[in-house]
Amino acid sequence: MVATDKDEKIKFKKELQHHCISVLEKRIAVADQAMKQAQEAANSEEKSSAGDKYETSRAMGQLSRDMNAKQLEEAQRDLAFVSSFSPEKLLDIAQPGSVVVCEGITFFISLGLGIIDILNNKVVMLSPTAPIALEIVEKKAGDSFEFRGSKTKILEVY
């Protein structure tokens, strides 16, 4: 999206940030619920005459809980990262939290969430560590970058 004024750019960035936060809040809720369910399952497994079965079930429940705890922690870390963006701050150089408008494509350097539709604009949500993001970061309007043999010009960064 090539926004024409500062207010439009800020509104667009706020919408992008809100989308990321919404996705992460859902991930946090799902991981938290799954972690609690796994813990409850492990705790409620009754001891039977087949002691090995009991121990295996408890261990599997604990592994599931640990996996969900890790996902929860990662989502919380991502939420803190995305929440640190200041949509009101319009950036001149591509970096995390910036919108990068190129010929035929727009990127938001934030989280790797794929392509989304925001305010009737298709935007590729990029992780700052994605290979294409590494080509874009530190560039400004007028610069070009090459990715997979294709050269693309940056029209605007904000």
Image: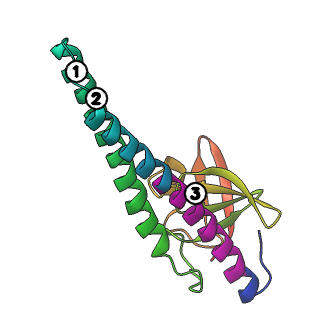
Q: CA distance from mark 2 to mark 1?
A: 7 Å
- At a point 71% along the width and 74% down the height, the residue shown is 12
Task: Categorize mark 2 by other alpha carbons within 10 Å: few (<14), some (14-19), many (20+).
Answer: some
Q: Residue furthest right?
A: 120
Which residue is labeled 3 in the image?
23
**Residue type, numbered disc 3:** Val
Task: Categorize mark 3 by other alpha carbons within 10 Å: few (<14), some (14-19), many (20+).
Answer: few
Residue 130 in sight from this viewpoint: yes
Q: Position of residue 96 (x, y in %)?
A: 49, 68
Query: Which stretch appears magenta?
Result: 9-28
Whether tag 2 and tag 1 are in contact, CB under 8 A, the answer is yes
* Viewer-nearest residue: 56 or 3: 56
Q: Secondary structure at mark 2?
A: loop
Q: Position of residue 136 (x, y in %)?
A: 54, 60
Q: Earlier in the sequence, mark 2 or mark 1?
A: 2
Q: Main secondary structure of the magenta part?
A: helix
Q: Earlier in the sequence, mark 1 or mark 3?
A: 3
Q: Is residue 17 magenta?
A: yes
Residue 62 located left or right of residue 78: left
Residue 99 in sight from this viewpoint: no
Q: Position of residue 95 (x, y in %)?
A: 50, 69
Foreground tag (1 vs 3): 1
Which residue is labeled 2 in the image?
45
Q: CA distance from mark 3 to mark 2?
A: 33 Å
